[in-house]
Amino acid sequence: MGALLIAANLRPAITSVGPLIGEIRADTGLSGTAAGLLTTLPVLAFGLLSPVAPRLGHRFGIEAVLLGCMVALVVGIVVRWAPGTVALFGGTVILGAAVASANVLLPALVKRDYAHREGLVTAAYSSVLGGAAGIGAGVAVPLADDAGLGWEGALAIWAVPATVAALVWLPQARRRHRPAPGPGPGTALRDLWRSRLAWTVTGFWAMQSFGFYVVIAWLPEILIEAGLDDADAGLMLFVAQVAGVAATLTIPPLAGRRPDQRGIVVASAAVLVLAVLGLIAAPDTATVVWVLLLGFGQGCGLSLALLFLPLRTREHRTAAELSGMAQTVGYLVAATGPILAGLLHDGLGGWKPTLVLLLAAAAAQLAFGLGAGRDAVLGIESRPRATSAGR
């Protein structure tokens, strides 16, 4: 329960910014470039700070570090609430750092405590992660305008559930598991960077994150250009998030029971390609169908990316290292997605070049997924099927 509460707090403080960016700019006078930086800072923090999390978990214990993440998240949200753009950006950096560490350590917690139920537990926390992200985006404007909180209050309110999560998790932090003897995280990380399997998992994470953040940033604008009004375009983004939650509920239990996930990788890539082709060819016809397919395909990608971390490792410390590597590279790549999509739009006109970019990302995701989905674990780059039948 405590881990699910932590997962529920890892996205709303971030996804609630996008729908309010117009109000934030009008009130603070931020330029378009500065506003883009505000939305990109958390993703950059994910990439830059992910390598630190395994070392913190190894030294202080996963439970204690996750508690610290929740406390830092509350601090970041409160700092962001203070007047002035310095506080706005400073608080965003703090909360991004907190979320970065928790992102890395939750899969390690799953590997350590739920080794025989990885699929079910990954389904639970990835669906909570995606669902909370959708809620954060969906209620931001109603909280700011209809509830009269303003954009500051609509962002600050997420300190409340983060505080609740910290209080619920506090007993777990007191009963911390001490790290088992073994090679330090530095040695393990050096081995990972030489592993082909680790790089395929990392590449898969990078490509699914790249596509996800392009969609989060630009899908409403793509649909507005196709003829939808602002409200309907925003609703379609929420629909995509709901479809993603459906995928995160169904895919991990199915994939976790299989020693080889390549068939699911191919199917999820096919759904993504069909969705993007539909948006290219007929964005104003059956729009909801294309958006549902897009959200479901991206939810499949997120589920598999999270599931590969425990499935491709033998123990939780290696899972934490692989999580750190995948998220470091993955989120640094993902941070370029919205910027590159915007540059394509400005340079070539229209949003079709951005949709073609999403097709390329889906193809790369498929290529990496065929490597990451094969029946193997780090240190045993291939293994006979009989060995993994009991997984």
Image (tube, rainbow, N blue to C red):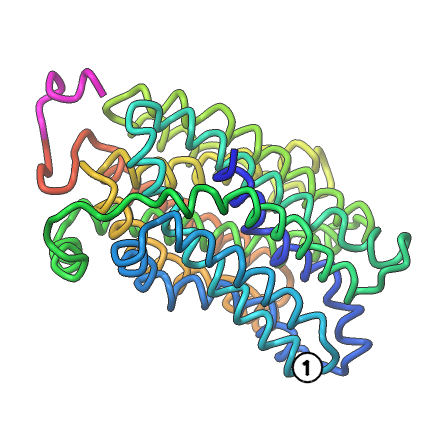
Could you say which is closer to the camera, residue 132 or residue 269?
A: 132
Q: Which residue is mark 1?
A: 85
Question: Residue at the spot x=32%, y=33% of the render?
Answer: 113
Question: What x and y, as percent, mark residue 93?
Answer: 53, 71
Q: Position of residue 20 (x, y in %)?
A: 75, 62
Image coordinates of residue 364 in percent, x first then y, are 34, 48
Observer-nearest residue: 120 or 358? 120
Q: Is residue 273 left or right of residue 201?
A: right
Q: Which residues are magenta?
A: 383-391
**Is 187 on the left-hand or right-hand side of 331?**
left
For residue 92, what is the image quadrant? bottom right
Under circle 1, the secondary element is: helix
Question: For the image shown, how many numbered marks are present on the structure?
Answer: 1
Q: Pick the residue in front: 3 or 179.
A: 179
The answer to whether residue 344 is above or below residue 242 is below
Per the image, is 389 magenta?
yes
Q: Residue at x 36, y 55 (%)?
A: 327
Q: Does residue 189 show up? A: yes
The location of residue 197, given as percent across then percent down, is 18, 45
Residue 117 is a magenta residue = no
Residue in view at x 88 percent, y 58 percent:
145
Crowdedness near tag 1: few (<14), some (14–19) or many (≥20) residues, C-alpha within 10 Å: some
Three-letter amino acid code at disc 1?
Answer: Thr
Q: Compare residues 250 and 168 and report the one nearer the observer.
A: 168
